[in-house]
Image (spheres, rainbow, N blue to C red):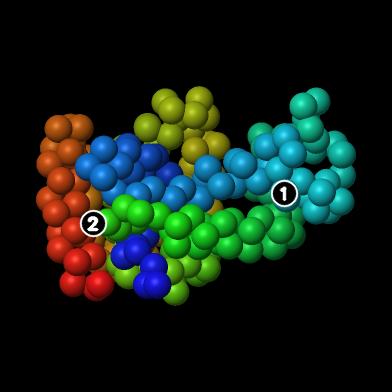
Amino acid sequence: MKPPYCVGLTGGFGCGKSTVAELFSTLGAGIVDTDAISHALTAAGGAALPDLFAAFGDAYRQADGALDRRRMREKVFADAGARRALEAILHPRIRAQAARQIAMSNAPYVLLVVPLLIESGHYADLLDRILVVDCEPGQQLQRAMHRDGMSEAQARAVLAAQASRSARLALADDVIDNSGARGDLAEKVRQLHDRYLELAKKSC
C-alpha cells in the first residue's frame, strides 16, 4: 500500500511551526511531530533512556527517571562531540517512529514536523514536498525569548546552531510567511491545505 502524501514542515527557531501545524490539523491534515516523538523516547520509561544513560551517565536522569532535557541541552550546546553522540542515539529512533506513524495515518495527507529537517538530512525519502515557515530574524529572536524565557544570548546561540534562513528557503517547495497576524496565517494555511489535497489525490 502506498504511504500517504507527506509534506515536511520546518522553519527556524521561533518562526511558528507548531502554530502552523495546529492550523493544518484543524483542517484534517495528519500530523507527525518529531519533537513529540523525541519527548516520548526520553520520558520516564522511554525506549532511548538505557542508551542515553549508558553514554552520558546517571547525572542526566531526573528523579522520575526521565532524561533531564534542560541539562542535556546545555551539555550538547557546549560540546559538539556530545551533540553527535546524542544524535546518534536519538535520530535513528525518531526517524523510524516517524515513518511508522506516517504509514499508519488515515489522513488525506501528512505533515511531518521536523525542526531540523534541513540540518539532519534523514527524512528526504519520506517526503513529497517541503514547507518552510518563515519570519524576519528579529521576530524569531523576540518570539524565542518570550516563549522559552531565554536570554538574548541563549536565543542567538540556538539560532546560530541552525541552518541559515537562506538555506531553508532554497530547499522549500512552499513558504508560509508568519510575520503577520494569526488571521492572515490561517488563510495562508487554508490555501496550502487545498493545494495539498489536490496533490495527494493526484499521487494516488
Between 158 and 52, the one nearer to me in the picture: 52
Q: Secondary structure at mark 2?
A: strand
How many labels, in total? 2
Rendering quarter of residue 74: top right
Residue drawn at 48 percent across, 33 percent down: 152
The vertical placement of 144 against 198, above or below, is above
Give how far apart the Cα atoms at labels 1 and 2 are: 35 Å
Q: Nearer the viewer, residue 71 or 111?
A: 111
Q: Which mark is residue 47?
A: 1
Visible in this render: residue 166?
no
Q: Position of residue 103 (x, y in %)?
A: 45, 62
Residue 185, horizontal then vertical, whole percent: 19, 40
Residue at image mark 2: 175
Horizontal relation, residue 196 to residue 149: left or right:
left
Query: Hey, which quadrant is residue 40 in on the image?
Result: top right
Specify the amino acid type for callout 2. Answer: Val
Residue toward you, 201 or 143:
201
Quadrant of the image containing the C terminus = bottom left
> Which of labels 1 and 2 is toward the front?
1
At which x and y percent is residue 83? 68, 55
What is the secondary structure assignment of the residue under circle 1?
loop
Q: Nearer the viewer, residue 9 or 134?
A: 9
- The earlier-in-sequence mark between 1 and 2 is 1
Q: Position of residue 149 (x, y in %)?
A: 50, 25
What residue is shown at x 56% (from left), y 61% (from top)? Answer: 95
**In the displayed structure image, the side of residue 55 where residue 17 appears, left or right:** left
